[in-house]
Image: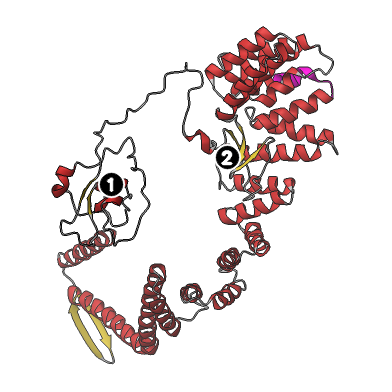
């Protein structure tokens, strides 16, 4: 649009100039080689413009002729490149669709039209075609070749990583992932694999540096990064709790600062503070974590903050926790345990029963059984409570990938994933698929009355001619060729004298829920076998 406006402005200016010359008539005299040429001013101006235009056209023609070989070669080169990119695009689409034959065909075509050093995607297409054809060795060679090209190095490391994962070579996979993570920390696959490797080897400082790099490149959100740092710092504090208590304390306090509601971090920080006789600060950390989410480990540490406290003092501390989080099963269980230690059986029983009403679980019944045994020693009631505990839902525990642990761990023992353990109830037992209400009063078991039936004997028709043919029994069992009719005394008496003797047998009694078939309905019976449904 701007060019059009500029063109119109130039044309308008030329028009104004020629109009100005036309309004001012004059003559121009030129003397050359003894000749004198006299023309008007307008003609002279037109002649000058024509000469300039002719010179420009001549220069353009000479330049075009001079550059014509290069122009022709460039035309064919661009055409060849376009065909190569078209083949490359078709090959990449075929590789994505899983058409290995077409991908290989287009790879060869693109390699003829485009040099691989000019277009690195040809190497990728060759590797993909090899993978589709099942030539994993050739694909690995292509990926290893990519390592020499700085532009394709990350792609080569990714391919070698996937091949190592396919072969189950975890060491090689983590090696390639580590190289990729060192070059580009923003790569999620490389960072995650390297993080698993570092945490598996217990290199918590290296894992913390990697998480910080992920946070700086905005690969993970700030909250997720803080959560990972808290988990890693807690793991570091656990590893250094005996060898370097000061470093463990620093790591635990930083973890608690990042995630005050993270129970393992709060627990280890408070434990280290209690060892240094800083009970006030440790108790404050536990109280903050308890308000966020009550946890039995927090209650245990809080009630035993001072080793020399009496049992009544521990009971009072448990009641203080209960005031912070009322109407919660963990609060009632904490008070019940402390009351049992203090021999306050009424308070212990009341709180344990309250915990069962709020959250029916195995641990509450076991605690109630301990209270019953300590107070009354009634083994019958104790066994009853233990049977209820067996059928009750299980207590929450640290669960990761199907593994149930009493203690928190930073990584899963199955997959090696960081922060895999969750505080939740494990999967229920198979016997608990059918729920039973143990607290309901015993009810009468309903009985199913058997249908009445008339007592009729099997009717046996004898052959009037006295032949030795088999007698026909009109009974429900005759409809099934696999059923065997019992031999009764009546049937034995009806056997001809020349027949084989048979021992008489008693009448086979029908089952209470099988009234049999009325002989009068024999003709209406279906010839098919009997089916219950």
- Mark 1–mark 2 Cα distance, whole angstroms, equals 89 Å
Pick out the residue farthest to the bottom: 33
Q: Residue at x 76, y 37 (%)?
A: 237
Q: Nearer the viewer, residue 14 or 425?
A: 425
Q: 42 or 211, which lies in front?
A: 211
Left or right of 440 on screen, residue 280:
right
Residue 281 falls within the magenta-colored stretch: yes
Residue at 72% from the left image edge and 9% from the top image edge: 316
Q: Please tell me whether residue 448 is drawn above or below residue 518 in the rendered image.
A: above
Does 416 appear above or below 222? Answer: below
Left or right, residue 425 beside residue 499: right
Asked if residue 261 is among those painted magenta in the image, a careful observer would answer no
Q: Residue at label 1?
A: 490
Q: Earlier in the sequence, mark 1 or mark 2?
A: 2
Towards the viewer: 65 or 213: 213
Please provide the residue range marked out in magenta: 276-284
Q: Pointer 1: residues within 10 angstroms few (<14), some, or many (20+)?
A: few
Callout 2: helix, strand or loop? helix
Label 2 CA crowd tier, 10 Å (few <14, some 14–19, many 20+) = few
Residue occupied by mark 2: 224
Quarter of the figure with residue 245? top right
The image quadrant that residue 447 belongs to is top left
**Disc count in the image?**
2
Query: x and y percent of residue 387 in the render?
Result: 59, 26
Kindly state the secondary structure of the residue where label 1 is placed: helix
- Numbered disc in front, either 1 or 2: 1
Q: Percent position (x, y) of residue 275? A: 83, 25
């Amino acid at each position: 649009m701007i060019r059009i406006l500029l063109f119109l402005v130039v044309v308008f200016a030329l028009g104004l100039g020629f109009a100005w010359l036309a309004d001012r008539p004059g003559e121009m005299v030129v003397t050359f080689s003894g000749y004198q040429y006299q023309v008007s001013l307008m003609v002279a101006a037109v002649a000058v413009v024509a000469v300039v235009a002719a010179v420009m056209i001549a220069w353009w023609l000479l330049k075009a002729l001079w550059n014509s070989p290069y122009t022709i070669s460039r035309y064919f080169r661009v055409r060849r490149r376009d065909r190569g990119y078209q083949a490359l695009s078709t090959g990449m689409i075929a590789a994505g669709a899983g058409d290995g034959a077409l991908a290989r065909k287009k790879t060869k075509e693109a390699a003829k039209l485009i040099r691989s050093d000019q277009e690195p995607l040809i190497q990728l297409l060759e590797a993909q075609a090899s993978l589709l054809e099942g030539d994993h060795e050739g694909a690995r060679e292509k990926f290893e070749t990519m390592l020499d090209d700085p532009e394709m190095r990350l792609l080569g490391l990714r391919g070698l990583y996937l091949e190592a994962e396919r072969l189950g070579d975890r060491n090689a996979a983590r090696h390639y992932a580590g190289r990729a993570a060192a070059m580009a920390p923003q790569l999620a696959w490389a960072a995650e694999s390297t993080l698993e490797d570092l945490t598996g080897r217990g290199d918590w400082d290296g894992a913390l540096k990697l998480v910080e790099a992920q946070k700086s490149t905005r690969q993970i959100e700030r909250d997720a990064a803080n959560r990972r740092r808290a988990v890693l710092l807690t793991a570091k504090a656990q590893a250094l709790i005996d060898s370097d208590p000061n470093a463990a304390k620093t790591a635990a306090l930083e973890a608690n600062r990042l995630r005050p509601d993270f129970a393992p971090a709060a627990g280890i920080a408070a434990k280290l503070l209690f060892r240094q006789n800083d009970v006030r600060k440790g108790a404050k950390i536990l109280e903050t974590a308890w308000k966020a989410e009550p946890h039995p480990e927090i209650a245990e540490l809080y009630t035993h903050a001072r080793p020399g406290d009496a049992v009544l003092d521990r009971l009072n501390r448990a009641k203080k926790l209960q005031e912070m989080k009322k109407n919660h099963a963990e609060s009632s269980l904490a008070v019940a345990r402390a009351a049992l230690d203090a021999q306050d059986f009424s308070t212990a029983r009341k709180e344990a029963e309250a915990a069962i009403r709020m959250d029916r679980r195995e641990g509450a019944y076991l605690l109630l059984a301990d209270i019953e045994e300590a107070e009354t020693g009634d083994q019958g009631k104790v066994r009853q409570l233990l049977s209820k505990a067996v059928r009750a839902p299980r207590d929450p525990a640290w669960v990761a990938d199907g593994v149930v642990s009493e203690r928190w761990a930073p990584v899963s023992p199955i997959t090696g994933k960081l922060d895999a353990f969750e505080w939740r109830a494990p999967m229920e037992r198979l016997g608990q698929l059918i729920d039973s209400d143990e607290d309901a009063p015993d009810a009468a078991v309903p009985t199913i009355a058997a249908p009445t039936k008339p007592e009729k004997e099997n009717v046996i028709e004898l052959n009037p001619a006295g032949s030795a043919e088999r007698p026909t029994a009109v009974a429900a069992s005759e409809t099934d060729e696999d059923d065997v009719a019992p031999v009764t005394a009546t049937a034995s008496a009806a056997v001809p004298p020349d027949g084989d003797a048979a021992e008489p047998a008693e009448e086979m009694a029908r089952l209470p829920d099988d009234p049999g078939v009325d002989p009068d309905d024999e003709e209406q019976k279906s010839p098919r076998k009997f089916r219950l449904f």
